[in-house]
Image: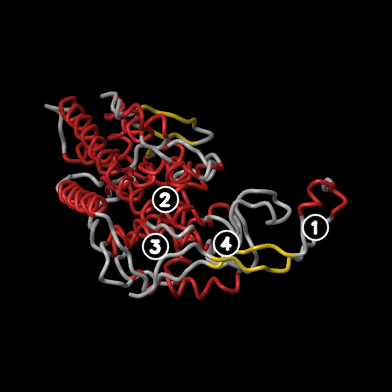
Amino acid sequence: MNEQWYTMGYERVPWQSSLDFTYISKRQRDKIKEDYLAAVPLKIASIGIDLTNEIQLLLDEVLVAIIRFDAIQQEKKYSFPALLLRSESAASSQIENLTSSVRNIALAELNVKAPHNAKLILGNVKAMREAIKSDSDIDKDVIKEIHKTLIEPSGADFGGHFRDEQVWIGGSSHSPHDALFVPPIANRINEYLDDIISFSKREDLNPIVKTALFHAQFETIHPFVDGNGRTGRTLIHRMLKSEQILLSVTLPVSSGLLANIENYMSAIKEYQNGNPLPIIVQISEALKLAVSIGTKVSQKIDKTLDTWMATIDQRRNKNLVNLLYLLVENPVVNSQLISKKMDISLRTANNLLNKAKEYQIIRQVGTEKRGIYYQSDEIISIFDEISDAKGLYRLFS
């Protein structure tokens, strides 16, 4: 491990544009030159990393907290990860200024006429499921499949395909000349992905350190035309799963990052400037906050379930109890979903929904024409809290 961290380099690349200059201003034309600078990041497969004692203590604290949280959630009678996936996807998308409520994201799984943003974020939910369904090593096919699943609901055809063109972040849409960051040229993508895949297989690094550096390097490579941020944050979960840190649950990592986006973005910039420590701290702090968020959410759900169970006491039956657990996973339901998930007839499903409605556990929404659904306002409100920055502030105030 002789390689050392250094500020990434840049290479000068000819700029070829098919842009019609008739429709852009002289000021914009003047910025467009014959060539531009594209990043040439360092490779990290065998790079060394020196941690401060303070960072090492933080890593130890976070690892213990994650493992303890994971073990506690394994004992639950409901699937805590199911709805957490939606709030995590909503928070990750909000970092990219793509917003929708947990309610609409849940509705998108039942109704093709759900709001457009909700359908896009549903792609993020499906990508998360794809990422955590296996703990096998990460390779190019895994990365492409996650991206394909993420992009599919948008109708775009580039899902699962590495880019063959230059992309850039910030600046003008006309050219990369005044961009905030210009990732490597397309011809370098495969060599850099080979490098981080080799890096992901190392066994000499703390798993959180490995996850943080993998994430920062992925964002630096920017291998896709679009969706790199959401794919990269999804891969955080895959890394934690493959490192066997999270065995049963999903942590709201993006909610943790959402609490301090500026520091997150700044840490990635610092990484690109040759300092890997800030992104390690940011991912560690985000995971630490994610455990706190997950714990508070879990406590609120348990309290809600206790109230529901008390409400149906004396009238309790197995199917009704199972419906309550299912509502934690799916806060927006219809009779078809209940019938399928619980393996009961539509008639029995409708009877259960009517009982839950009578006990004011759910309420009916929608119409005969657009479709009738039932939602749990209590569960939705809990998870909406951790899907945006203001909600997180209220959660801990």
C-alpha separation, residue under disc 2 versus residue under disc 1: 36 Å
Asked whether the residues under the numbered discs 4 and 3 touch, taking CB atoms below 8 Å apart as contact, a structural biologist would say: no
Q: In this view of the protein, which residue sits in the foreground, 173 or 374?
A: 173
| Mark before the other along the chain sequence, 2 or 4 | 2
Indicate the quadrant where residue 216 lies: bottom left
Q: What residue does disc 4 label?
A: 183
Badge number at residue 19: 1
Gap in angstroms between the C-alphas marked 4 and 1: 21 Å
- The circle on residue 125 is 2
* Lateral position of residue 302 relative to residue 32, left or right: left
Mark toward the start of the polypeptide (4 vs 3): 4
* Residue drawn 49% across the image and 62% down it: 7
Q: In the picture provided, is 35 more to the left or to the right than 126?
A: right
Judging from the image, the colouring scheme is secondary structure
Of the residues under marks 1 and 3, which one precedes in the sequence?
1
- Does residue 353 sit above or below 172 in this rendering? above
**Residue at x 62% of width, y 59% of height:** 167
Amino acid carrying label 4: it is: Pro
- Mark 4 Cα within 10 Å, few/some/many (few <14, many 20+)? many
Kindly check if marks 2 and 4 are in contact, taking CB atoms under 8 A apart as contact: no
Whether residue 336 is visible, yes or no, is no
